[in-house]
Image: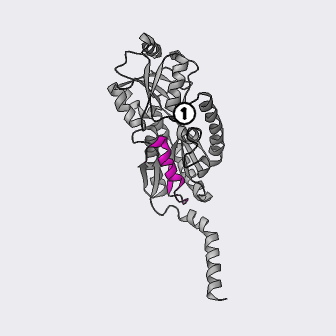
């Protein structure tokens, strides 16, 4: 056998063995987890909770990298274009992953650019208002918005985001004029909500719960079917006067499409241990959400259902990203 033939055979053997070898050796260097939104928002908070524990479990640092902008498309695209080797992950927010495909048909990524790893959290939303608003419950807020046809200025983390959709839904169900004020992430919204530059923010509790507890923001309703243990004094939407008003987000980890299945399996198993741990559950409940795990197969099916549901809501509501 000549050298060129030997080299070819060796290359083929190594190529065939490389996925298993990569999984056995993985991770051999730090992992980057990209968050497609600004620091201090719900996605960022969950990423840091997972990242801290994942680093301990796999024995390598997990670097959280915020890449906000373009309604989550910048950070999401960065992961879609990354090497499929398990060293670049996406902590994704439901509104971006299943809403953006309908809102941004020209975006330079699509859901099939990703491999599902694990669902890590589900979170009904909280109707948060500025402390400067003279409202102690939803009925007060609706009356305030209707008075002299003033309306309500509500914030979102971007055009077409779930907060945008939640605001439209609130206006229709409460029969209150609403004006949308988009931001580049939840973090900047909170500062303006405290300052009274906007009236209302319907968002996941982690974004605002600290300021609610500090008395700088008021939480008027929780959009889940039952009260949350971290906010026992906050009524559900139904209790507060809007029985059909329900809004929920979820957060999940994805890898670039083509990431070796053994690596995905290894990551998902580590993440499952974290999500099902009492410490993580307690911390997530403190933030107003619920720890929830799905394996890659279940998450794939769930995403497909959500894509169809969101596309229908966006079309029927004539919601655009502009």
**Residue 75 vertical placement versus 178 (above, below):** below
- Inspect this view and state whether residue 232 appears: no
Asked whether 294 falls inside the magenta stretch, the response is no
Instruction: Spot the residue most to the bottom.
Output: 2
Of 118 and 11, nearer the camera is 11
* Quarter residue 104 falls in: top right
Residue lying furthest left in this view?
195
Q: What percent of the width, then of the height, locates residue 238?
A: 55, 18
Residue 257, given in percent of the width and then of the height, sits at 59, 54
Instruction: Give the residue displayed 37% in from the left and 15% down from the top.
Output: 134
Q: Which residue is mark 1?
A: 320
Quarter of the picture containing the N terminus is: bottom right
Viewer-nearest residue: 159 or 5: 159
User: Is 80 contained in the magenta span?
Assistant: yes
Q: On the image, which quarter does residue 262 sit in?
A: bottom right
Q: Residues within 10 Å of mark 1 (few under 14, many from 20)?
A: some
Count the marks: how many? 1
Segment colored magenta: 67-90
Q: Residue at x 47, y 16 (%)?
A: 138
162 versus 13 height, above or below: above
The location of residue 183, given as percent across then percent down, is 42, 35
Whether residue 212 is visible to the viewer of this picture, yes or no, is yes
In this orientation, which residue lies closer to the viewer: 222 or 141?
Answer: 141
* Colour basis: one colour
For the point 62% across and 44% down, the residue is 299
Secondary element type, mark 1: loop
Q: Position of residue 294 (x, y in %)?
A: 60, 43
């Amino acid at each position: 056998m000549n050298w060129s033939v030997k080299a070819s055979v060796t290359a083929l053997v190594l190529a065939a063995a490389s996925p298993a070898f990569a999984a056995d050796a993985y991770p051999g260097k730090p992992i980057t987890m990209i968050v497609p939104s600004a620091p201090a928002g719900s996605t960022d908070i969950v990423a840091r909770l997972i990242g801290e524990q994942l680093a301990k479990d796999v024995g390598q640092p997990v670097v959280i990298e915020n890449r906000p902008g373009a309604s989550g498309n910048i950070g999401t695209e960065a992961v879609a274009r990354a090497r499929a080797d398990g060293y670049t992950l996406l902590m994704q927010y439901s509104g971006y992953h299943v809403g953006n495909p309908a809102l941004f048909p020209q975006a330079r990524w699509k859901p099939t650019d990703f491999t599902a790893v694990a669902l890590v959290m589900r979170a009904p939303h909280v109707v948060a208002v500025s402390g400067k608003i003279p409202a102690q419950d939803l009925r007060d807020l609706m009356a305030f918005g209707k008075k002299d046809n003033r309306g309500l200025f509500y914030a979102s983390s971007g055009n077409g985001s779930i907060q945008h959709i939640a605001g439209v839904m609130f206006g229709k169900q409460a029969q209150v004029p609403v004006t949308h004020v988009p931001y580049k992430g939840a973090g900047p919204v909170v500062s303006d909500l405290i300052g009274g530059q906007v009236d209302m923010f319907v968002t996941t509790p982690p974004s605002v719960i600290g300021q609610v507890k500090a008395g700088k923001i008021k939480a008027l309703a929780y959009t889940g079917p039952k009260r949350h243990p971290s906010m026992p004094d906050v009524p559900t939407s139904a209790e507060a006067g809007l029985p059909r008003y329900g809004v929920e987000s979820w957060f999940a980890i994805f890898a670039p499409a083509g990431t070796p299945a053994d690596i995905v399996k290894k990551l998902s198993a580590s993440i499952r241990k974290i999500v099902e741990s009492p410490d993580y559950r307690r911390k997530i409940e403190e933030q107003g959400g619920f720890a929830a795990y799905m394996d890659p197969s279940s998450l794939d099916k769930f995403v497909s259902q959500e894509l169809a549901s969101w596309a229908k809501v966006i079309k029927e509501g004539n919601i655009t990203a502009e």
